[in-house]
Image (cartoon, grey):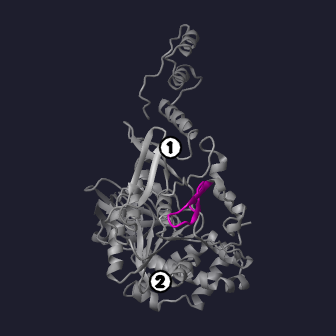
Amino acid sequence: MYNNKRRSIYLPIAFALVMIVGFLLGATLIRVSSLNKNISLLQSFQTSKYDPVNDVLGYIMHDYVDSIDAGKLRVFAVEGILKNLDPHSQFISAEEFDEVNEPLMGNFDGIGVQFRIENDSVYIINTIQGGPSEKVGIRAGDRIVKVDNKLVAGVEIDNRAVMKLLKGQRGTKVNVSVHRRGISKLLSFNITRDVIPTYSVDVSFMPKPEIGYIKLSKFSTTTAEELQDALMSLRSKGMKQLVLDLRGNSGGYLKSAIDVADQFLPEKDLIVYTEGYNRPKEVAYATSTGLFEKGDLIVLIDEGSASSSEIVAGALQDNDRATIIGRRSFGKGLVQEQLTLPDGSALRLTVARYYTPSGRSIQKPYVNGHGDEYESELYDRMVKGEFESVDSISFNDSLKYITRGGKVVYGGGGIMPDVFIPIEKNENFQYYNSVLNKGIIHQFTFEYTDKNRPRLNRYNDFSDFDKRFQINESILNEFVAYAEKEGVPRDRKGLEYAKSEITNLMKALISRNLYDDKGFYPIYLNTDKTFEKALESFDS
């Protein structure tokens, strides 16, 4: 049903950013003696001290027919409890803790490379400028074969395993052996791990005179500082209007969201307030430190914009500070607090709801915690046609709110944009969607970059590449033949209809392989309908 719709690709490659940097319940389990154990258990059930979780766990571990891993059993119990609370309370094991939290910390310890796994080979996309790997001479295009003499090529290794090998405490050393095209022997590098920064601002640039663009991918501990630097840089170049792109941004820290909104709102404007049954109302107001409190502002959102993204979009919409363009956001309006536990695991518990300045709760409905309906809600939106037409969205008049300037907005499930941008539905996009969904465009451009890297490296920088490099008919025909081998038949009509999208995306992906996101977005946005609408809105 959805194959003929043009899909957006804000982060088309799932890069592993290896820049290569028993849960305790707190009570003793009941021990039941072998004599009269059933009577003892029954008696404990009848007392005021009865604890169903600990008592039942104790009974299971003492009398179950097979051996039991007590640690895993406790984790299952905690996960079962949380699953019935709400969709976003969760238990994080000690093994998962760093992986879950590092993306929001702003840095981690490692060797400083971006990689992807292709054909059982760990291929280095880019080295971090000034990072440990670049300093010792590792280059984009190198293939990691061994890490500390452990073979990682041709052994079906996954991203997590590679990251575990490459990451480590700063100051420690790791030996990496790589294959470099044109050199027969492996090259060996001893790399000293160091602090590797991660960034929230994927890119900031001026697509047109006086118009700035900032792509924000998450809300981490460094987001406010990064945004401030980006705004100062764009203002120095003459920015008077700004597009803030929050599409696909699933959120992060509440404080970072408040700090981001504060950059655009005048002093004393309400940004957000939170409140829970066991948490008093807390209110956040804008300060006088904002760098872009005046000037046209447009915020882009979609169904992947959640949590902190919705706080920012809601604050700017309710204060009539920005025009929101895109599609209805995810609808996560619950606030979690993280409690680190003695064994290194953690509990993220929902403690409050957040509300936009007009009083809206953006949390979409849920029943009995992690229900199937909640998990499939975005799919249901698609089936109902919401991604194609604003008329497919039902609004509840009891959840109607009024912004400061008198505009009607709605609560009850995400931020509804002021300007709706549908996903295009046209049977002529079938070829485009086929090569996109099967990863053929990404794979082809990856291999093209790899084979032609010496020639591509002759461009002085991204600007030089953008001006001089084009996807000509020869490259396009090579791609079509490649797609046929991968099971997508040639479709002349479909190819001609989506030719501009296909060639533009190919160029953008090749540019990303060479220059990271700073080379991707300025090209990709050329055929981005939502971005085009933002530019039109400035003109009008």
Q: Position of residue 45 (x, y in %)?
A: 56, 16
**Magenta run includes residue 405:** yes
Please indicate whether residue 513 sits to the left or right of residue 42 in the image. left
Please indicate whether residue 511 sits to the left or right of residue 475 in the image. left
Which residue lies under the disc numbered 1? Answer: 90
Please state which amino acid type lies under the numbered disc 2.
Asn
Mark 2 burial class by Cα count in 10 Å: few <14, some 14-19, many 20+: few
Q: Position of residue 379 (x, y in %)?
A: 67, 58
Q: Position of residue 492 (x, y in %)?
A: 72, 85
Task: Specify whether residue 149 is in view.
Answer: no
Span highlighted in magenta in the image:
399-415
**Front residue of this view, candidates 287 and 300:** 287
Q: Is disc 2 placed on a helix, strand or loop?
A: helix
At x 43% / y 22%, what residue is drawn? 28
Mark 1 burial class by Cα count in 10 Å: few <14, some 14-19, many 20+: many
Q: Quadrant of the C terminus?
A: bottom right
Which residue lies under the disc numbered 2? Answer: 452
Mark closest to the chain's N terminus, 2 or 1: 1
